[in-house]
Structure formats: C-alpha cells, structure tokens
C-alpha cells in the first residue's frame, strides 16, 4: 500500500483508536485500557470492538474494524495471540497507521510463536502499518491524553522526559515513580518484543523530538547492535540518555529470551560501549528515576561542588566518605558564609564547616531561615543538599514546622538560583503520621522543583552520575 511507512510521531499523535477486545468486565485488559482512556480524557475518537456487545462503558461498540464509520489511525489488540492474525489481516486492507499488539505468545514463546510474529510482520509490511509489540502495553502521550498504560491516573501535563521500555509493567511503574518526583513526560513507549518498532528507531525519534530533553530506557537486548551503537555515538553530548540494561548474566539472558525473545550481551562489553557513547548506566527502576530527575531538574548547571548540611556528626562523616567515593567536592565554606553561620548557630553541638552539622535535625523556623539563606548564598558551592529524618524533625517542630523549614531552604535556594536537593526519610517504622508527612513532603517539594531522594548514598551517586551537557543541548 505504498512505500512510506508511518513515523513514530504520527503514531504517538494518533487521533482515533480502535480497541479490539474492549470489555466492560473488570480485570480484562480490554476493560482496563478502555477505562484508562476514558479517565484520561483521550482527545481522539474511541471505537470499542466487540463481536456481541452493542455498548461498552457507555460507548457504541462495533463488531469489526470494517464496520467503523472511519478508518482508525491506531488499533490496539487485547485479544490472545492466536486471534491476532485475523485482526491484522483486516488492518492490512484498511490503511491504519499502527497496531499495538499486547498479547504474549510470539517470538519469546518458541518456534511456533516466532512463526506468528513473522506472519504479523509480513502483514504489516503489506498493509503499510507499523507494529508496536507484541507482548507490550503500548504508548502514553499526555499531549493528546492517549494512554495504553494501566490506570487513568497518569498526568495530562506534558514534560520533557521520554521513557522506552521492553517491559510493560516497568513502563507503568516508572511513569508513576517519576510523576511522584515531580517529572512529566513527553511520551512513554512500551514496545515488548520490538518486532517492528524497536529501541533504535524509538531512540532516534526522541533524540530528534523537540519536546524531549531527557531520555530513559529499560532494555533487555537490541536487535541491530551496530546500528544501535552508531546512533548512540552520533547523539553523544546532545541529549542525556539514562539506560538500565538487563540480561548481562547467563541466567538473566535466559530470562530476557523467555520474556521478549531478546538477545543480551556480556556486562563488560555493554558497559564499555555505553561509556564510550556517553550513556549513563543505572541499575533498577528507582536508580534510573532518581538519576533522571537530576538531568530533568539541573539542565546545564554545574553541581559537583556540594554544600552538605544536616544534624549529626555521624551523618556528616558518612557524607564526606560518599563525596570522596563518587568524586564530588565538599569545598570549604566562604568566609562570609562561615561568619553568618557562626552567628546563627549555637556553639554547642554545631560544626560550621562543609559538611555543615547544625547540631540537631532542625532548628526553629525563624533561625533555620537564616541558616538556609547563608547556605544558599555560599559562593564556594553549586548545590545545597540537606538531610533530614522526617520523624525526628516532626518530634521537634511538628508537621508545619518541618514544612516551614524545608520551604524556607527551597525559597532561599530559589532566590540565589542555586539547586536544592533534599534527602528525606522516615526512621519511625510504620508510624502513620510520620509516613504520611514524609510522603506529602516528597510530593510537594518535588512539585516545587527540588531534587528529592530517600537515601544519602543514592543522592551522592545520582549527583555524580549527572554531568552538564555542552552548551546548545536541547533541554
């Protein structure tokens, strides 16, 4: 049906969608994804496809794709693998742009599944449409409120972070995790087996996309290694890429093959090649998210000179060790900063240096404002990192006192134009009041633009992983 095939941009911006296997029955994917689309308020036309039902979740249902009043730009198939071929044959004769195949049971399932995947590709090429998947969730595009991730709680506010993932579950988890850190997305694409639209083509799109400034990825393997690494080398220095690559051990490689049919590779080879391409390699979703927030928040600002502050000598000694381990600087405070801090802090318990031990987890808000302002205005450092066990702060000042101090630090850093990082954690176990305060503070402060961490090692590691891109990079 013509040589030109739809681009990633055209697929992400699809303005009409047919959901094959739509259902009103709870716990079915056809119900889950239709509910998500309705909750998000998808701006395009939605066509539920069901052989028997005339209405699904208040929308008119249609028995087949051919019975629709228009050709949908995107078709999402939620039925089992053995039923997909019939739908794909119908798509090939209609002129749809792309098909999302959510079902497993293709290449990752062995020879019979590999034959099914090959037949799906043949139909796509003959019909001129693209395939996302199989064995995936699909795409999330806040600009059009399109979501094929489970749950309608994803933000409709666009941002500059893109995420591609071979795992559907990780795509959903990462989306929520990053939103809790105050980040918003240009898009998320869960692409599963990558039979057609694969990691290389997706990365190529986001490297060029003007709305994307930071890219994160979860990969189990790549289909065309030479092409993949050539793309990474060409991108070096343009946009940051934070990559969690699994399947580097023998056991993990077997798991990756059974999950998405991906070919993995040795840890040594991958690590060396990624380092040469300037890719930031991470381990786990949490680490990927907290490293991504550094690039998302910091842009081009220098941050290696850290002013570390908190309450306790042990904390400050540990922070100094972490800074040395990860290659960050804790430079001496400027004379003016020292003078102001000595005037504000009681000589008992406090140590005016860098790290700065304020003596107790928190002081009274009025006094803390002066400490925060002095720290933010220190000419020797690029970033302020404050450590607080929220439960201890709460015991001293109550919920509102803790909030007032942290907001004072953020305001002081904002006036100076200096990044503010907060390591907040709860040491009171399952004490509900402390748990709720910790959660609400993280959400509020991240929304206001702070870097938020739960662990001091993670904070230093993430700041070290961040390195400012060259002038002219797209942020």
Image (cartoon, helix red, strand yellow):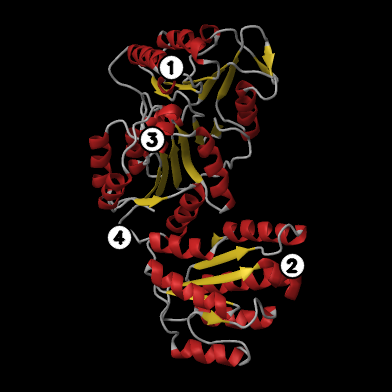
Mark 4 sits on what residue? Answer: 471
Mark 1 sits on what residue? Answer: 96
In this image, 181 relative to 100: left or right?
Answer: right
- Which of pointers 2 and 3 indicates the residue nearer the eye? 3
- Which of pointers 4 and 3 indicates the residue nearer the eye? 3
Mark 2 sits on what residue? Answer: 399
Among the two numbered marks 1 and 2 on one chain, the one whose residue lies closer to the N terminus = 1
In this image, 192 relative to 205: left or right?
Answer: right
Mark 3 sits on what residue? Answer: 253
Q: Please rate how many residues cluster around mark 1, counting C-alpha atoms within 10 Å: few if below 14, some from 14 to 19, many from 20.
A: many
Among the two numbered marks 4 and 2 on one chain, the one whose residue lies closer to the N terminus = 2
Q: Position of residue 382 (x, y in %)?
A: 42, 73
Residue at the spot x=30%, y=51% of the render? 238
Check disc 2 and report its element: helix, strand or loop.
helix
Q: Position of residue 185 (x, y in %)?
A: 49, 44
Whether the residues at callouts 4 and 2 have beta carbons within 8 Å, the answer is: no
Where on the picture, by quarter, is residue 79?
A: top right
Residue at the spot x=29%, y=53% of the render? 237
Query: Mark 4 and mark 1: span between their CA atoms?
Result: 41 Å
Q: Position of residue 298 (x, y in %)?
A: 44, 61
């Amino acid at each position: 049906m013509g040589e030109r095939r739809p681009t990633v941009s055209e697929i992400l911006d699809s303005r009409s969608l047919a959901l094959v296997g739509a259902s009103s029955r709870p716990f079915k994917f056809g119900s889950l994804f239709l509910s998500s689309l309705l909750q998000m308020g998808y701006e395009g036309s939605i066509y539920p496809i069901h052989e028997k039902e005339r209405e699904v979740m208040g929308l008119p249902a249609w028995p087949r794709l051919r019975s629709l009043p228009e050709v949908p730009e995107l078709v999402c198939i939620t039925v089992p693998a053995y039923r997909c071929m019939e739908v794909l044959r119908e798509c090939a004769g209609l002129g749809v742009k792309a098909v999302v195949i959510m079902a497993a049971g293709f290449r990752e399932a062995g020879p019979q599944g590999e034959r099914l995947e090959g037949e799906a590709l043949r139909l796509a090429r003959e019909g001129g449409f693209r395939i996302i998947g199989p064995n995936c969730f699909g795409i999330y595009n806040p600009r059009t409120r399109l979501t094929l991730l489970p749950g309608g709680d994803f933000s409709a506010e666009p941002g500059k972070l893109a995420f591609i993932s071979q795992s559907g579950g990780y795509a959903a988890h990462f989306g929520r995790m990053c939103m809790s850190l105050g980040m918003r997305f240009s898009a998320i694409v869960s692409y599963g087996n990558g039979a057609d639209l694969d990691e290389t083509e997706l990365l190529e799109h986001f490297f060029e996309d003007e709305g994307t400034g930071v890219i994160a990825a979860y990969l189990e393997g790549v289909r065309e290694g030479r092409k993949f690494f050539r793309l990474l080398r060409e991108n070096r220095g343009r946009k940051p890429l934070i990559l969690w690559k699994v399947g580097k051990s023998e056991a993990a490689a077997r798991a990756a093959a059974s999950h998405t049919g991906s070919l993995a590779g040795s840890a040594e080879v991958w690590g060396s090649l990624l380092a040469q391409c300037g890719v930031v390699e991470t381990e786990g979703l949490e680490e990927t998210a907290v490293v991504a927030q550094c690039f998302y928040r910091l842009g081009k600002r220098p941050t290696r000179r850290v002013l570390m502050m908190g309450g306790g000598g042990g904390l400050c000694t540990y922070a100094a060790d972490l800074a040395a381990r990860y290659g960050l600087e804790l430079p001496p405070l400027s004379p003016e900063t020292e003078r102001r801090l000595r005037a504000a802090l009681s000589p008992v318990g406090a140590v005016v240096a860098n790290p700065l031990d304020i003596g107790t987890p928190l002081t009274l808000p009025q006094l803390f404002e002066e400490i925060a302002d002095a720290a933010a205005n220190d000419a020797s450092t690029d970033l302020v990192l404050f450590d607080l066990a929220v439960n201890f702060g709460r015991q001293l000042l109550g919920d509102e006192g803790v909030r007032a101090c942290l907001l004072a630090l953020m305001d002081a850093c904002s006036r100076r134009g200096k990044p503010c990082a907060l390591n907040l954690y709860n040491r009171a176990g399952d004490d509900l009041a402390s748990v709720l305060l910790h959660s609400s503070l993280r959400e509020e402060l991240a929304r206001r633009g702070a870097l938020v961490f739960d662990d001091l090692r993670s904070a230093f590691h993430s700041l070290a992983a961040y390195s400012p891109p060259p002038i002219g990079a797209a942020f």
